[in-house]
Amino acid sequence: MSDKIKFELEFVIQSSPQLLYQYLSTPSGLSEWFADNVNSRGEIFNFIWDGSEEEAKLLKRKSDEFIRFAWEDADDGVYFEMKIIVDEITSDVSLFITDFAEDDEIDEAKMLWENQVSSLKQVLGSK
């Protein structure tokens, strides 16, 4: 069993769910904001940052709603997920991030996501 702790973040994003999903689920979309480069072969995605490479397996996806990955060396039950939620009343689009980190790394992991999502918002032209 993993010692990692689950955490969740929410970001309001001014985008259509369909466009946002393209940036969450395709190698070209993910390369725009999440990593320097992303390649995929079937369910295996390779994320490249500054010459280092991490492999993740696509666990689940539902078009225009969510995508879930697990890093190749992750403990069982540990994943990261990006879910698109549309408020039924206001039609605001939110991106919910679910991830896991060691207790002493949660603040750093949250800051990393905040920086990545900030890049995503710039790519989308969202505030």
Image (cartoon, grey):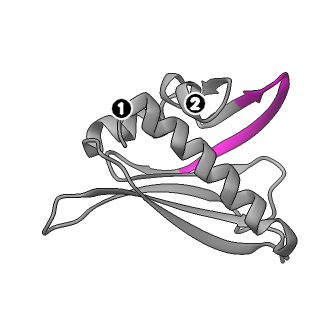
- Asked if residue 31 can be seen in this view, the reply is yes
Instruction: Locate residue 122: give its quadrant.
Output: top left
Write the start and end of the magenta stretch as one range.
47-59
| Badge number at residue 68 | none
Q: Is residue 57 magenta?
A: yes
Q: Secondary structure at mark 1?
A: loop
Residue highlighted by disc 2 = 42
User: The C terminus is located in which quarter?
Assistant: top left
Q: Earlier in the sequence, mark 1 or mark 2?
A: 2
Relative to 32, residue 90 above or below: below
Q: Considering the image in quadrants, where does the N terminus appear?
A: bottom right
Label 1: how many Cα within 10 Å (few below 14, some 14–19, many 20+) = few
Closer to the camera in the image, 77 or 7: 7
Q: Nearer the viewer, mark 1 or mark 2?
A: 1
Q: Which amino acid type is shown beneath numbered disc 2?
A: Gly
Q: Where is residue 102? Give x, y as percent.
A: 83, 69
**Which residue is the site of mark 1?**
125
User: How far apart in space, not on screen, are marks 1 and 2 (Cα)?
Assistant: 30 Å
Q: Going by the image, does 64 lie left or right of 97?
A: left
Q: Is residue 78 left or right of residue 80?
A: right
Measured along the vertical axis of the image, is residue 110 above or below residue 4?
above
Residue found 68% across the figure and 24% down from its top:
36
